[in-house]
């Protein structure tokens, strides 16, 4: 990895909301609509964060009809480093299981 690539990578993961998004993606692939529930943010804000993560190839998207499902890019050369860093963080206050319990876990198909 070159210096400029490392700088872009570190900038992408240095935002609190993006760290939370990556932490959630460690557990399950998610749709933007699920992130809006988990983070109490608007769809455009979530999309902007995902765009920054995608620019450095940390996440990948899969289209399912009109839905986009996001997941971690396990082929990224720094994936093991990312997983280690995220494992050092506490679990988010809100969990994916809480979405299920509240009936807000969306099945995007």
Image (cartoon, rainbow, N blue to C red):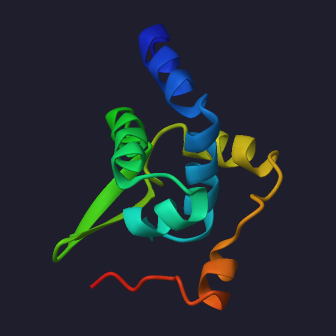
What residue sits 50% from the left and 52% below the top?
Answer: 41
Answer left or right for 29 relative to 79.
left
**In the rendered image of this protein, does residue 105 appear above or below residue 74?**
below
Residue 104 position, x and y percent, is 53, 83
Seen from the viewer's position, the closer of residues 7 and 15 is 15
| The quadrant where residue 56 appears | top left
**In the rendered image of this protein, does residue 16 appear above or below residue 64?**
above
Seen from the viewer's position, the closer of residues 57 and 14 is 14
What residue sits 43% from the left and 82% below the top?
Answer: 106
Quadrant of the rendering where the C terminus is positioned: bottom left
Name, please, the residue furthest toward the top. Answer: 3
Answer left or right for 28 relative to 108.
right
The total of numbered circles placed on residues is 0
Answer left or right for 86 relative to 40.
right
Name, please, the residue furthest toward the left. Answer: 65
| The quadrant where residue 62 appears | bottom left
Residue 60 position, x and y percent, is 35, 54
Answer left or right for 44 relative to 38.
left
Residue 65 position, x and y percent, is 16, 77
**In the rendered image of this protein, does residue 54 appear above or below residue 91?**
above
Residue 108 position, x and y percent, is 33, 81
What residue sits 51% from the left and 83% below the top?
Answer: 105
């Amino acid at each position: 990895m070159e210096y400029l690539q490392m700088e872009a990578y570190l900038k992408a993961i240095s935002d609190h909301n993006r760290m939370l998004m990556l932490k959630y993606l460690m557990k399950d692939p998610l749709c933007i609509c699920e992130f809006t529930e988990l983070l109490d943010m608007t769809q455009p804000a979530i999309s902007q964060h995902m765009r920054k993560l995608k620019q450095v190839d940390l996440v990948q998207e899969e289209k399912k009809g009109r839905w986009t499902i996001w997941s971690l890019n396990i082929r990224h050369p720094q994936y093991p480093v990312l997983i280690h860093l995220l494992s050092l963080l506490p679990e988010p206050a809100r969990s994916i299981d809480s979405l299920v319990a509240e009936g807000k876990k969306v099945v995007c198909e």
